[in-house]
Image (cartoon, coloured by chain):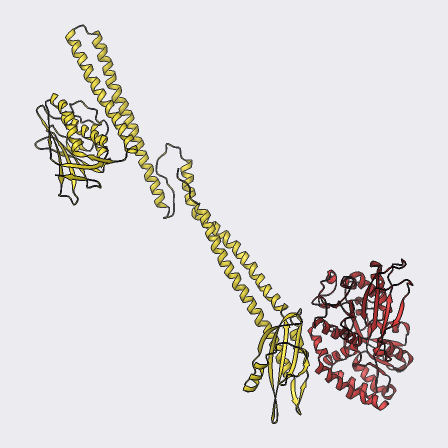
Chain colours: A red, B yellow
Amino acid sequence: MKVNCRLGLCLILFSHMALAGAAQSGTSIIFPSLNKQPKFEGEVLTVYGAVNHRVISPLFKAYQETYTNVAIHYTESNTRHLYEQFLSEPNARPDVMLSPAMDLQFKLANDGYALVYDSPELGHVPKDSHWRSELFGFTYEPIVTAINTDILAREALPQSREQLLNLIRSKNHLLDEKIGLFDIQQSGLGYLAWAYDGQQSRSYGRLLEAFGTHQAQLYTDTASMLDGLLKGQIFIAYNLVGAYSYQWTQKYSWIKTIMPTDYTTIIMRTAFIPRDAQKVTLAKRFIDLLLSPEGQHILANQSALTPISTKVKGPFSRDELSKLPHGIFRPIPLGLELLIQTDDAKKRLIYSEWRDAIQPVLNRKK
Amino acid sequence: MAKATTSIRRQLILMVAAVLIVINIIALWSAHIYANRAAKESYDRLLYGSALQMAENITILDSQVFIDLPVSAFETLALSASDRAFYAIMNGRYQVLTGYKDLPNIPFTQLLQQSSEKEKFIPIYYETMYHGEKVRFVALGKRLLEADSVNDVFIIVGQTLDARRAAATEVSHMALQFVALFFVITLLLLLFVIWRVLQPLQAIKQAITERSPQELSPLEANVPSEIAPLLKSINYFMAQLDNTLSRLQRFTAEAAHQIRTPLAGLNSQAQNAIDETDETLRQKQLQHILESSNVLTGTVNQLLSRATLTHRYQSHPFSPVSLDHVVKETCRELVVWALERQVEIEYLGNIQVTIKGDEFALKQMLQNIIENAIKYSPKGGVVEVELMVMNELPDTSIRLQIRDQGVGVPDKDKEHIFEYFYRSPDNFASGSGIGLSIAKDVAEHHDARFHLKDNLPSGLIVEVIFLQQKGLSYES
């Protein structure tokens, strides 16, 4: 696909598959090449990602500074949608697939959709952050809880899940319909984090019960959940990606971000090059940048995404992250353990538990 | 010069290296087989373990199969970090309950057979291609019992082979390193041993090289029993050489003396003859000169004939010789000379015999013996020459006897008579003293026995016995 970028503007398009619901929407953004010659036709790198385009753009910029003739066509969507789109369109696969839904990414790699690429930059990142030279973890991000402190009144900010449950119990009906959750049936990341909670903690059942009792609101993306938190539609947002939450905390002082001190789930955003990628070489260069100290530095300083590398410095580096109050970091392993998250039977079990707890509330709302 | 064959050292090293290489190749090959088997078994166990954990979490409730796979099953699989894994849970109607829907070559026949036999399920391992990679699967059945119904489900778990290959390769590499080290160390040790074993040979060589050419005393060296015979042979050879050399020295000295003395005598006699005024005395002196000259001629002839014979021994092969003919001819040639000394030669014997030998040498031998017999015979004596066939010995042999009636040789001199220039102290006849030793040499060259015996009532018998030999023929 050749794109003529005479205007040199960022074009933000809603893609053809955009549907009414936010969960199903996919946003197409073109980052034109830096080559401003008239009638210049360069190459286009197609990237699918769940990360907000504003967050990832410094990385694209750095890439395009090296490869000035390359335009980047970025499709932003939620993780589950990206996964389904990848499978349903075998003839229009991207050159790079980025997603924090490790289980879905892993399933694609395990099923042989990923290209093997021994990036020379792999030495810069931890050994357990990549799998078979097919799937590359490039961030190290906590799953957090965000709280609008208005709800606290005189109560202390809860630090653990247990304290969160206590808070919910004490506020009781004040929190009815005021808790925000990812809809695990719509959001891949939401399901991953929730299922991982199920493996880790005994508080999982009580949390589910509490969320059900208080008619938790379901969201399909972080932005709208944080928006709801800001507008007072919800006071508690559970299992958010830390990067976004911390940004809001910086902007709005009454929104606090907590890394639960019982344990803090860590997810990696992962990238792979599909086997059917059109621009394999360009994609490889992008992976190289992503894993290189330079790319990791951009993440830690401009993208607000905590990079996987322990060596880079910056406001969002792993060093800085571990200085914040946190529990035991429990990174979700990037390996065959993730297959359990994609298991249909398991999914049916978790969904049915979820529906039993939360769906009746939704029905009652109608 | 003998051509050196391949060096023992090199042969030993080559053989040792060859044996080591063969052993090491066998060791490597076995290590490789073992590594593959060990890797296969251990990873099969992981696979089986994973399937068992899955099986344990499959239950039946109200005819509904309830599956809640444990994370541990996948954690077990994740132990081989670089492998893909695939799984499926199926019921007896080939329906996939969860997992991968398109796993190939599932051994349903065997699974259903196990299912129908109502026995304990045993895992079935198989390898097949899936998603473009070779995958090893285990298929395991699980019996679900509920009140009056029996339901079997099948668990299929598979994994790619990278981890087992890596494990096998690692073990093989370790084996390779070990074997390489072992090879180098053993080779060095064996090289040292070979060097050590061959050291005595080197020492002998060194000892011989360092000697002056004249030194022929035995080599003194401590050598292993295998090399001792060699050293013994060398020492024996050197002793022989020493003996020969000293004989030669003695011979040369004696020959020089033997020639110089008569020459000096001749010289002074000739001088006297020139100075002599008395005609009769001068005639006598001239007569003496002639005699001395004859003796000298005889000596020189003997020495030359010996030199000729020595040369002939090395250059002339044997040919058939009519012995009786040679004997008769020699007698005939000497009979005039004998008669001048009033000695008769009598040839006894009426056989015709042919042996293999050197006619010239044999004739020299006969001449020397007969001349010697004539010389020592008293006037009017008879020298008997007899040739006969002897049957007393186990083998038929030919006996030649030359008998004289002289004074004979006392026993104490018989040993010395063959030494060059030996002459009995009581000797009165003229002679060079080497005639009999030449005769004995010739006899021995023909493998004949040479004896001296006493004749009765007095005199010497020289006896030569030609042993039965190839090519000997005779007629009585």
Residue B19 vs residue B91: left or right?
left
Name the residue located 75 percent from the left edge and 86 percent from the top edge. Answer: A352
Residue A193 position in % (x across, y down): 77, 77
Residue B35 vs residue A41, the one in the foreground: A41
Name the residue located 37 percent from the left edge and 33 percent from the top edge. Answer: B215
Residue B446 vs residue B173: left or right?
left
Residue B402 position in % (x across, y down): 14, 32
B435 w.r.t. A173: above or below? above
Image quarter of the C terminus of chain B:
top left
B227 w.r.t. B400: above or below? below
Could one spot residue B472 in this view of the protein? yes
The quadrant where residue B327 appears: top left
Residue A52 position in % (x across, y down): 85, 71
A90 w.r.t. B304: above or below? below
B82 w.r.t. B176: above or below? below
Residue pushed farthest bottom?
B148
